[in-house]
Image: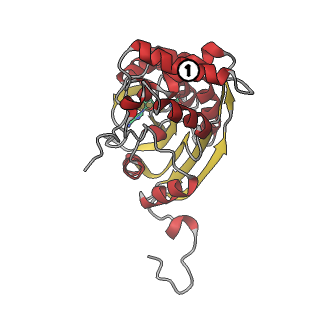
Amino acid sequence: MTDPQRQPRTAEWDADTYHRVATPHVAWGQPVLARLPLRGTETVLDAGCGSGRLTAELLERLPEGRVIAVDASANMLREAEANLAPRFGDRVSFRRADLQTLTLPEPVDAVFSTATFHWVLDHPRLFRHLHAALKPGGWLVAQCGGGPNLAAFLGRVGRLMASPPYAPHFAGWPGPWEFSDAETAAERLRAAGFVDVETAVVPAPTTMPDRGAYRDFLTSVILGAHLARLPDEETRSAFVDTLTDEAAADEPPFHLDYWRLNLMGRRPAAGDPIDGGLPPPPGGNGS
Ligand SMILES: C[S@@+](CC[C@H](N)C(=O)[O-])C[C@H]1O[C@@H](n2cnc3c(N)ncnc32)[C@H](O)[C@@H]1O
């Protein structure tokens, strides 16, 4: 039975603020995009496109190609459409869907995703759906939070959540994220059918320039699901203010201990060597 506490985030995003403040996400996402092998004519799924800042860079790498921008959030899709449709016309289409149940009418040449998979709780199911969305031979190239992502920050958040007046609103709540380690992610990708799998957790320490930027970032990027559990604006504001005051006293101030999980895998193509390139073991039957 599904744990009712372990539901995906239902609170809507403040997409306009996200678009403005998610600058670290763009910096993290650019090298991920650079790893995606493209000729420029493909159709690519952006899985969790958000407000579309990286989707725009993906479209620039596809002068004769197309992007299917998928997101579960109506606010994010509206923001993405407003930002992308005037510039890229019908080379980009928008689809509201949960990636855990996504089905596409036609398979795509590649899947790109940044800063999204940790919001998706069932990774085995997610990877099966992305594998099914790909043409044989197509690559998944992605990055999300993973490993010890935000462990120090979340320790502080956890202590605040356990204190009055917040504790009753978080009782028994496991949080909104799945931060996988590299080995588990690789096993899940292989179990979903991917080959040539590579995963790695890398540090991405991030320091916000000032109090306002840090506060906006907590409110509109990190803590949306937490704040949605609090009863009113006054309580939400006090929660973020306390965390901001504590971060102001840190050395350096307003620092976030981000870690990112890089993931790559390919849907096998007919005629691929068995086991994604390795010869069958001596004496083995190759199955
Ligand atoms: C932090 S934003 C990342 C957006 C963009 N890729 C970027 O790097 O800036 C995470 C996005 O994942 C979307 N998302 C979270 N869970 C999802 C799910 N199960 N299915 C589809 N989208 C989801 C959210 O709505 C949100 O737009």
Mark 1 closeness class: few <14, some 14–19, many ≥20 residues within 10 Å: few
Residue 201 showing in the rendered view = yes
Give the secondary structure at mark 1: helix
Quarter holding residue 119: top left
In x, y percent, where is residue 195?
A: 51, 59
In x, y percent, where is residue 29?
A: 60, 34
Quarter holding residue 102: top left
Residue in the image at 51% along x and 29% along y:
160
- Left or right, residue 190 beside residue 31: left
The image quadrant in which ligand 1 is located: top left
Which residue is nearer to you in this view: 95 or 44? Answer: 95
- Tell me: residue 114, above or below residue 236: below
Q: Amino acid at mark 1?
A: Thr
Quarter holding residue 39: top right
Residue in the image at 52% along x and 34% along y:
159
Which residue is nearer to you in this view: 159 or 270? Answer: 159
**Which residue ends up furthest to the right in the rendered image?**
251
